Image (cartoon, rainbow, N blue to C red):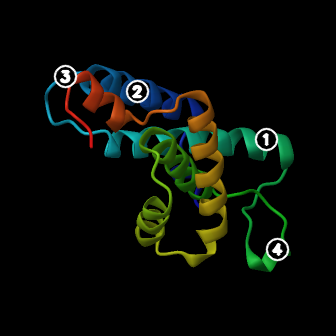
């Protein structure tokens, strides 16, 4: 991978802060801004920041990325944790499980990510259910006084 394509952590954190602010502003308004795409973007940014921390802590001094030819050694690519971050963010916010697994697997077209995506889904869903029982959509319906079945 060319070093010119690496994102700096401060740029990722700025991107994360901007999208988080935009999402907070537009989630309470009546405009159809949505929550799905902002959750994907915020989750990808969090996953990318975690990749930098993970590689610095667990793979210090290693300059190459994990590949089948390296025998299981090397840094983890940022795209791996970006997909898992987006999955965790969406599962925590929307409380979707298997449908979200199918969406993320079709988006990435990689069957190798099936087990990590499923584990990420269950951990984020469980943590979201323990901390706040309602999803973002359920909270929006309650605040707009829409009756539920």
Q: Which of labels 4 and 2 is toward the front? A: 2
Q: CA distance from mark 1 to mark 3?
A: 40 Å
Q: Are marks 1 and 4 in contact (CB under 8 Å)?
A: no
Circle on res. 12: none
Q: Residue at x 51, y 32 (%)?
A: 133
Q: Residue 18 at x, y = what percent?
A: 38, 25
Residue 24, position in %: x, y?
Answer: 34, 22
Where is residue 74 drawn, in percent x and y? 80, 61
Q: Is residue 84 above or below residue 129?
A: below
Q: Earlier in the sequence, mark 2 or mark 1?
A: 2
The reply to whether the C-beta atoms of the residues labelled 4 and 2 are less than 8 Å apart is no
Checking the image for residue 70, the label placed there is 4
* Helix, strand or loop under label 3: loop
Nearer to the camera, 133 or 4: 133
Q: Residue tagged by mark 2?
A: 20
Q: Residues within 10 Å of mark 3 (few under 14, many from 20)?
A: few
Q: Residues within 10 Å of mark 1 (few under 14, many from 20)?
A: few
Q: Secondary structure at mark 1?
A: helix
The residue where tag 3 is placed is 29
State how far apart marks 3 and 4 are (Cα).
Answer: 50 Å
Left or right? Give the position of 59 relative to 142.
Answer: right
Q: Which picture quadrant has residue 50? A: top right
Q: Nearer the viewer, mark 2 or mark 3?
A: 3
Q: Earlier in the sequence, mark 3 or mark 4?
A: 3
**Sequence-earlier tag: 2 or 3:** 2
């Amino acid at each position: 991978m060319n070093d010119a394509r690496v994102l700096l952590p401060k740029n990722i954190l700025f991107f994360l802060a901007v999208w988080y602010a935009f999402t907070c502003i537009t989630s309470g308004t009546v405009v159809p801004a949505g929550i799905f795409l902002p959750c994907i973007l915020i989750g990808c940014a969090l996953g990318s920041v975690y990749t930098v921390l993970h590689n610095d802590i667990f793979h210090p001094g290693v300059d190459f990325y994990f590949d089948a030819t390296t025998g299981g050694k090397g840094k983890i690519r940022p795209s791996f944790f970006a997909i898992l971050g987006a999955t965790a963010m969406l599962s925590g916010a929307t409380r979707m499980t298997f449908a979200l697994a199918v969406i993320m697997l079709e988006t990435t077209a990689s069957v190798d990510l099936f087990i990590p995506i499923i584990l990420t889904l269950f951990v984020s869903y469980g943590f979201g259910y323990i901390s706040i029982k309602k999803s973002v959509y359920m909270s929006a319906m309650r605040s707009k006084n829409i009756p539920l079945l």
